[in-house]
Image: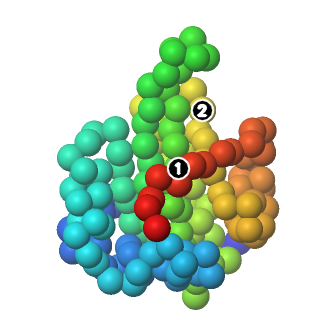
């Protein structure tokens, strides 16, 4: 396996443009995200940054942002009051996939969840992302549930 020398840190305000570009850098993302900042992205970033139960992180290689994910910690009563870690919006730059960065970022998130006392780590992945599904399965994740979403956006 190729080691990427990925350096993981909390995202900063100055990273916002690079993060948005990562979200829009695939066939699915380009239909949902625009590759430029706007007030909605800034508002979401500010809310995430202000809440200690959310960690928006970036992975850098040689000082350049190469990957990101949002790790959220969710309390619950089921499973005997278990905390869950939810991974959202995990992305690795298209040109850098296949070099171990996703594994490093995912390992970091799992370890952070353990450190926070979470009983499980969960994530969702668009059903069209078959390569991502194989990646998560190789990492030990199991497709145990069906996911349902209801869009509340107006058209």
* 4 vs 86: above or below: below
Residue drawn where x is 43% and y is 54% of the image: 70
Dot 1: few (<14), some (14–19), or many (≥20) neighbours within 10 Å?
Answer: many
Q: Residue 150 at what x, y percent from top left? A: 57, 49
Q: Nearer the viewer, residue 34 or 117?
A: 34
Residue 6 appears anywhere in the view = no
* 112 vs 49: above or below: above
* 96 vs 50: above or below: below
The image's colouring method is rainbow
Residue at the spot of label 1: 87
User: Which quadrant of the structure image shows residue 57?
Assistant: bottom left
Residue at the spot of label 2: 120
Farthest-out residue, top: 80
Please indicate whether residue 65 sits to the left or right of residue 27 in the image: left
Quarter of the picture holding the N terminus: bottom right
Rendered image: mark on residue 128: none
Element type at marker 1? Answer: strand
Farthest-out residue, front: 155
User: Which quadrant of the structure image shows residue 9?
Assistant: bottom left
> Gap between marks 2 and 1, in whole Å?
11 Å
Q: Residue 43 at what x, y percent from top left? A: 23, 60
Residue drawn where x is 71% and y is 68% of the image: 129
* 90 vs 109: above or below: below
Residue drawn where x is 22% and y is 70% of the image: 39
Element type at marker 2? Answer: strand
Residue 39 appears anywhere in the view = yes
Residue drawn where x is 59% and y is 39% of the image: 121
Please indicate whether residue 153 sits to the left or right of residue 54 in the image: right
Dot 2: few (<14), some (14–19), or many (≥20) neighbours within 10 Å?
Answer: some
Q: Residue 62 at what x, y percent from top left? A: 39, 82
- CB of mark 2 within 8 Å of CB of mark 1? no
């Amino acid at each position: 396996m190729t080691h990427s020398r990925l350096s993981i840190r909390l995202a900063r305000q100055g990273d916002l443009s690079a993060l948005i570009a990562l979200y829009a850098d695939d066939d699915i993302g380009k239909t949902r995200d625009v590759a430029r900042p706007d007030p909605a992205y800034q508002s979401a970033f500010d809310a995430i940054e202000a809440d200690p139960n959310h960690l928006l992180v970036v992975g850098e290689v040689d000082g350049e942002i190469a990957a990101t994910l949002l790790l959220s910690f969710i309390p619950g009563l089921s499973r005997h009051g278990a905390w869950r870690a939810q991974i959202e919006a995990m992305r690795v730059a298209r040109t850098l996939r296949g070099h171990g960065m996703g594994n490093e970022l995912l390992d970091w998130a799992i370890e952070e969840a353990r450190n926070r006392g979470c009983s499980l780590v969960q994530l969702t992945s668009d059903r069209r992302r078959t390569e991502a599904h194989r990646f998560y399965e190789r990492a030990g994740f199991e497709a145990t549930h069906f996911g349902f979403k209801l869009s509340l956006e107006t058209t």
